Amino acid sequence: MASDETAAPTDWQLYTGERVPHEGIERLPDPPPWRTFTGGPPLPVPPGDSGNRHAAASYRPSRDAVRQVNAALYLRRPLLVTGAPGTGKSSLAYAVAHELGLGKVLHWPITSRVALRDGLYEYDPLTRLYAAERAREDGPRGATGPDDIGDYLRLGPLGTALLPYERPRVLLVDEIDKSDIDLPNDLLTIFEKGSYELVELARRAEPTARVMTADSTTDRVEIRDGTVTCRAFPLVVMTSNGEREFPPAFLRRCVTVDLKQPATVEELTAIVREHLGGVVGADHGEGTEGELPDGAREIIERFFARRSKGLLANDQLLNAIYMCHHASFSESPETVAELADQVMPYLSRDTAGLDDDGGAPR
């Protein structure tokens, strides 16, 4: 959503940003020698689209975003995406998965309480203990066979992304700047090794089990020797609002891109047309399908003018146009304009409550 400009396809670019699904990922060359992983046996990527078709089909990547996505794919490195709220950081992950046919995006939302283990896998020992007690109480009639530890292990988004898929999965690590201070450093080892150990399996005499994944609780994958090693390193898209600095050791192992706010009214108009052209366009005989009516263009210009006085996000503009489109059927133009401002409040404290002229609060 950051820009109206997209990169023209070239021989080396697998992801073009043109939002048309294709098999370009088949042209991905072998990794650099220091980023080769040998997990197996190979697994097919689960069928299905990105999981957010609207975001994937409407996202307009900048030229820099397209180039850096390709760099991350070639180098088998995580992509750190920074930018203001509403610039499309999360949408980029869905757009790549959609265009390159990489299946459903694995989503790992980050909070200050999240630890590395949460992303790798979950083990439920209490439920396993209760099941064992019930089996003993029921005696021979309740026995159904040996205890299956796979019933109590489920891989998380990161753990699933590191399975030995034939094609890279897309993992969205959302708002990593909200993490505990240790998480970025903890991720370094995982990203370098491309593997991790399931301790509960490794301790068993038979360290092989079929476990659940983040994709499904019914379809299982076999883990051998208590270890998961990737085959195609996943495209890890980590988003950040720029609320903290990351360690140099972490940054040097990432490919980075900073998404900018649209610089012109025309760029904002193109974004709105992609998302809402089919909803608010061609209404009441105004223009052709996808062409925005005058009311929508006025809100875009108002949003652009107000943005110079404080922090606003592009999704606020989309919300305002959608709401005002429906309100215009029964409300006066003055009331609709007031509704637009109410749906587009400033996001920063120093500008919250300012009037349209940037003066004192009303």
Image (cartoon, helix red, strand yellow):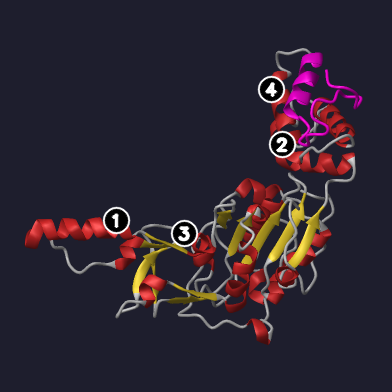
Check disc 1 and report the residue beneath it: 127
**Residues at circles 3 and 1 in contact by the CB criterion of under 8 Å:** no
What is the quadrant of the C terminus in the image? Answer: top right
Task: Give how far apart the Cα atoms at labels 1 and 4 are.
Answer: 50 Å
Looking at marks 1 and 4 on the same chain, the residue that comes earlier in the sequence is marked by 1
Looking at marks 4 and 2 on the same chain, the residue that comes earlier in the sequence is marked by 2
What amino acid type should be assigned to the residue bearing mark 3? Ala
**Residue drawn where x is 49% and y is 65% of the image:** 120
**Residue drawn where x is 34% and y is 78% of the image:** 207
Closer to the camera in the image, 250 or 147: 250
**Residue drawn where x is 37% and y is 71% of the image:** 200
**Percent position (x, y) of residue 130?**
24, 55
- From the viewer's perspective, is the residue at label 2 or at label 3 nearer? 3
What amino acid type should be assigned to the residue bearing mark 2? Leu
What amino acid type should be assigned to the residue bearing mark 4? His
Check disc 4 and report the residue beneath it: 326
- On the question of residue 175 being in view, the answer is yes
**Percent position (x, y) of residue 358?**
90, 27
Give the extent of the magenta segment. 333-362
Task: Give how far apart the Cα atoms at labels 4 and 2 are.
Answer: 13 Å
**Percent position (x, y) of residue 357?**
92, 24
Looking at marks 2 and 1 on the same chain, the residue that comes earlier in the sequence is marked by 1
Q: Secondary structure at mark 1?
A: helix
- From the viewer's perspective, is the residue at label 3 or at label 1 nearer? 1
Check disc 2 and report the residue beneath it: 276
